Amino acid sequence: MSFTGEHGLRRVGRVLGVPLSRCSQRLESCLRRAGNVLPTPLDPLRLDTPPMLETSQDFGWRNGHASRRGHSSKFSESRASSRFMVKYSVRSVFLTKKPQPLKNMNMTYGDSANVSVGSSKLKDQPAGERPRERLIERGAAALSAAELIAILVKTGLPGANALDIGKQLIQKFGSLGAMAKASVDELQCIRGIGRDKAVTLVAAFTLAGKIAEELQRESPVLDNPQAIADLLREQNRTKNVETFQILMVNTRRRLIRVEQVSQGLLDTILVHPREVFNSAIAARAAAIVLVHNHPSGDPTPSEADIKVTRDLIRAGQLLKIEVLDHVILGCATADRSKDFSSLRELGYFYA
């Protein structure tokens, strides 16, 4: 028994569970492939019922059916086996999903042999090498800057974990100070740092500045340049221009408050004695400490810094408000262990 034309296609569609349109589009190519398996060619318009329309439970060619066509029993078994293979080949052609493209568009099919079977994810690394576990075991001070950043960014990319991204950030900006000055948009230039991760990093650096401000409110004793530098270091680290500040202290050298007097350009600043001592008088300060930063990182005082300091010392003597010191904040290097300089220690307070 055989069926031809559209009726045969509909029966094939019911058995295979696919619509008629798909059958008509792909059946001819499927049957051409089947012709390479069967000992006799197949007519695309003529579908024999047994191999194509029977299910796996009732499938099979009987020897008698083959004999009526003049075939031997032995050949009938071979033909039945071949048609069984064709039947499921047809089902696989119609029902198998098309191959999906690689998610990583930078990788080609030819590169698949070069892909490492190892995992770069932090969770797959030994516990002693994961930043979070190291922080718990050894404390935050034992971690590198890249490891601390990895804890903040949390996740990485295929082929680059969070620790790798932390190293890329430090390499890109050169230092933590430069990274702290970066905006959200600038941080997103690094592959793997999206908006949320950039916001997290900016928030972390800003939180460090808030901690420094809290220390100021605890009224620390400011009787040496190191204490002054420690107090204002983080607050001034992210500034891109020179900023002049005064620390107002009482008779016991305890901090009353910090006030910004003026903000200049990249390497210059203008300060007037009236602005400096007006705040000190209002705060009833017994003495003041002058502080400003050098964005270049070199805390060496310039001639203008020395002149401004001596002018303010003379003005303070008239107002009975002592100028204790002038501290310039910069950055430490391999050749310079201190990231600040004190004009009093350098001898510029004595004309």
Image: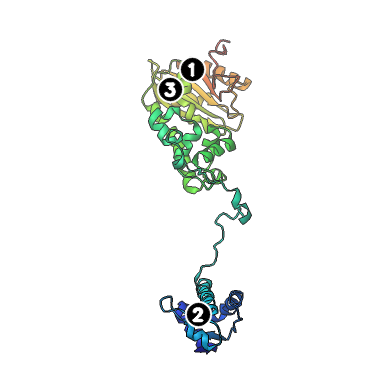
Residue that badge 2 annotates: 51
Three-letter residue code for mark 2: Pro
Q: From the image, tell me which residue sits under label 1.
A: 225
> Where residue 270 sits in the image (x, y, percent)?
58, 28
Q: Is residue 249 found left or right of 113 in the rendered image?
A: left
Which tag is nearer the camera, tag 1 or tag 2? 2
Q: Amino acid at mark 3?
A: Met
Give x and y (percent) for residue 17: 45, 77
Residue at position x 50%, y 75% from top? Answer: 84
Residues 341 and 313: in front is: 341
- Cα distance between the residues tagged 1 and 2: 95 Å
Residue depicted at x 40% and y 17%: 253
Would you name the residue on which mark 3 appears?
A: 248
Judging depth in this view, the residue of 226 and 305 nearest the camera is: 226
Helix, strand or loop for disc 1: helix
- On the question of residue 100 being in view, the answer is yes
